[in-house]
Image: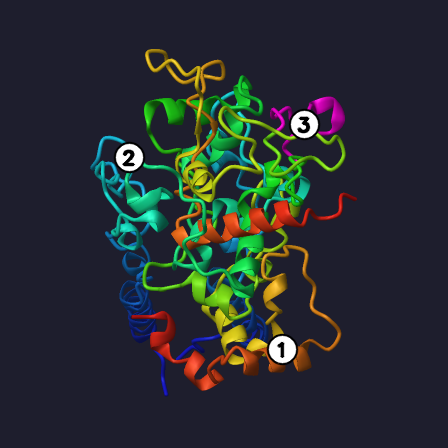
């Protein structure tokens, strides 16, 4: 009976074992990492220009945080009124815009959509930049009250003409802080400072804040039902 | 072990079927990411204005505003045609004053200035670095020009506390507003928009008023 495999098969099998299998494993790992861990799949750093309100209306400008927060030094809470009292930080109603823009730039075509919305009593459709899964019950007020500042998750909003994500908001990323909050806590006076940077002795200060603010232990903070209900 | 072509083919087929099963049964569970429920501010095509939340019915009062009295209306006994209250109905201590200062800086300072001098970043003519907003009222006699700002009935530093409360809550209606025409830049409904929907906590409004009074009594140093 003739040989089933000829001599060349040895080379093919060796190639398969030492090159093929590692390549397949690497590809699988890369695919898994891309879809479950990478920033790219969640559009981190992608400016959401085209989804800003009126971004698709010719001649209209989108809202610029850089101008309002960076330039005019407006406080986050001027518009995001719910951030200290509610799970939802709140998107401002058109009346908040009109409070100034009925008199500032009242005829600008870039603001046509704001005036339209006010005249027709239809809300402006702002677009969500960070969209958490519906099974995550994130609460803004408790984070703000316990020393987590805006920029820890949202980045330096005051420098963004068009808002983009600075974090992919993976669960592992949430747990980084829930396991060791002292790395990220800041004093109450700095919560709304978008340019805050941790001091050199952050861990010592963070531990002090953790104690002062009665923050729970990491085993309590990593309990499933803290975020999932 | 002898491997025949048939058994090799069978093995490959089995592995492929197993792989197929693995793909089918390891679903991505995206249906739980996007559940058919409305969170705050979700859009909805069910209602004509595209919003899932329903507007408040006219005459709705908040739970903190149920009691109609001086604290919730700024007028004596809560009577809508009575005089403005002249004293702050909440107890003022250091904490309230600090709260008032913080809230003032958030909601008022952009136009009225951090020092209450009407020189916030939004105020003043464009040529002087402002945004063209007509200079908002000064809260006290301007230390620099010596002029007191008046409105129709009283100078603002003489205005009763209730007047400030009414202004924060209901805004300053434009006296020349023509309701038959649409609200445009030439026909604004308010010269100062109501802030009640932003400064929702009634005690916060009184704390701001306490802080304004403090600035009037002890004007902060100008520059």
Distance between the Cα atoms at labels 1 and 2? 44 Å
Q: Position of residue B125 (x, y in %)?
A: 69, 23
Q: Is residue B106 left or right of residue B1?
A: right
Chain ID of residue with mark 2? B
Q: Is residue A74 magenta?
A: no
Q: Residue at x 45, y 32 (%)?
A: B193
Q: Which label belongs to residue B50? A: 2
Q: Is residue A85 left or right of residue A63?
A: left
| Predominant SS along the magenta part | loop
In the rendered structure, are the residues bearing label 2 and label 3 in contact, judged by CB atoms less than 8 Å apart? no
Q: Residue at x 62, y 34 (%)?
A: B138
Q: Position of residue B117 (x, y in %)?
A: 67, 38
- Label 1 belongs to which residue? A206
Q: Residue at x 34, y 15 (%)?
A: B179
SS of the residue at dot 3?
Answer: loop
- Label 3 belongs to which residue? B124
SS of the residue at dot 1?
Answer: helix
Which of the 4 quarters of the picture holds residue A91?
top left
Give the residue at the far right of this rendering: B223
Give the residue at the far bottom of this rendering: B1
| Viewer-side label of 1, 2 | 1
- Say if labels 1 and 3 share a chain: no
- The residue lying toward the viewer, choosing from A152 and A27, is A152
Q: Range of the magenta residues? A: B121-135
Distance between the Cα atoms at labels 2 and 3? 38 Å
| Residue B221 visible in the current orientation | yes
| Residue B201 visible in the current orientation | no
Rendered view: B96 above or below B82: below
Q: What quarter of the picture does the N terminus of chain A occupy?
A: bottom left
Q: Position of residue A196 (x, y in %)?
A: 67, 60
Distance between the Cα atoms at labels 1 and 3? 42 Å
Task: Categorize mark 2 by other alpha carbons within 10 Å: few (<14), some (14-19), many (20+).
Answer: some
């Amino acid at each position: 009976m003739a040989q089933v495999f000829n001599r060349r098969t040895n080379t093919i099998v060796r190639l398969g074992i030492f090159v093929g299998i590692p390549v397949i494993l690497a590809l699988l790992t890369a695919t898994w990492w891309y879809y479950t861990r990478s920033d790219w799949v969640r559009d981190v750093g992608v400016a959401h220009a085209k989804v800003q309100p009126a971004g698709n209306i010719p001649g209209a400008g989108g809202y610029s945080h850089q101008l309002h927060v960076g330039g005019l030094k407006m406080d986050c809470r001027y518009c995001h009124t719910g951030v200290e009292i509610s799970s939802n930080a709140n998107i401002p109603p058109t009346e908040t815009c009109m409070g100034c823009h009925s008199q500032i730039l009242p005829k600008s075509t870039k603001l046509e959509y704001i005036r339209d919305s006010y005249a027709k009593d239809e809300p402006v459709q702002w677009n969500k930049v960070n969209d958490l899964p519906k099974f995550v019950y994130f609460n803004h007020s408790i984070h703000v009250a316990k020393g987590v500042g805006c920029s820890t998750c949202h980045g330096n909003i005051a420098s963004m003409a068009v808002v983009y994500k600075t974090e992919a908001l993976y669960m592992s990323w949430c747990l980084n802080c829930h396991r060791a909050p002292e790395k990220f806590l800041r004093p109450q006076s700095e919560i709304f400072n978008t340019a805050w940077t941790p001091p050199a002795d952050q861990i010592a200060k963070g531990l002090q804040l953790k104690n002062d603010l009665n923050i729970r232990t990491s085993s309590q903070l990593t309990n499933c039902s803290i975020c999932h209900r | 072990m002898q491997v025949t072509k048939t058994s090799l083919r069978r093995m490959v087929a089995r592995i492929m079927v197993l792989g197929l099963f693995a793909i089918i049964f390891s679903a991505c569970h995206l249906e739980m990411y996007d559940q058919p429920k409305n969170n705050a501010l979700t859009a909805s095509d069910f209602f004509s204005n595209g919003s899932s939340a329903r507007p408040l019915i006219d005459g709705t009062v908040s739970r903190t505003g149920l009691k109609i009295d001086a604290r919730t209306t700024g007028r004596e006994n809560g009577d809508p045609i009575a005089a403005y209250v002249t004293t702050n109905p909440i107890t003022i201590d250091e904490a309230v004053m600090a709260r008032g200062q913080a809230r003032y800086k958030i909601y008022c300072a952009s136009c009225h200035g951090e020092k209450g001098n009407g020189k916030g970043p939004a105020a003043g003519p464009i040529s002087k670095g402002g945004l063209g907003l007509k200079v908002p009222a000064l809260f006290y006699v301007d230390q620099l020009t010596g002029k007191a700002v008046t409105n129709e009935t009283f100078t603002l530093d003489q205005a009763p506390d209730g007047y400030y409360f009414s202004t924060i809550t209901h805004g300053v209606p434009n006296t020349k507003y023509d309701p038959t025409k649409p609200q445009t830049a030439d026909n604004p409904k308010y010269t100062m928009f109501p802030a009640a929907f932003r400064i929702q906590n009634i005690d916060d409004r009184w704390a701001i008023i306490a802080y304004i009074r403090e600035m009037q009594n002890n004007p902060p140093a100008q520059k």
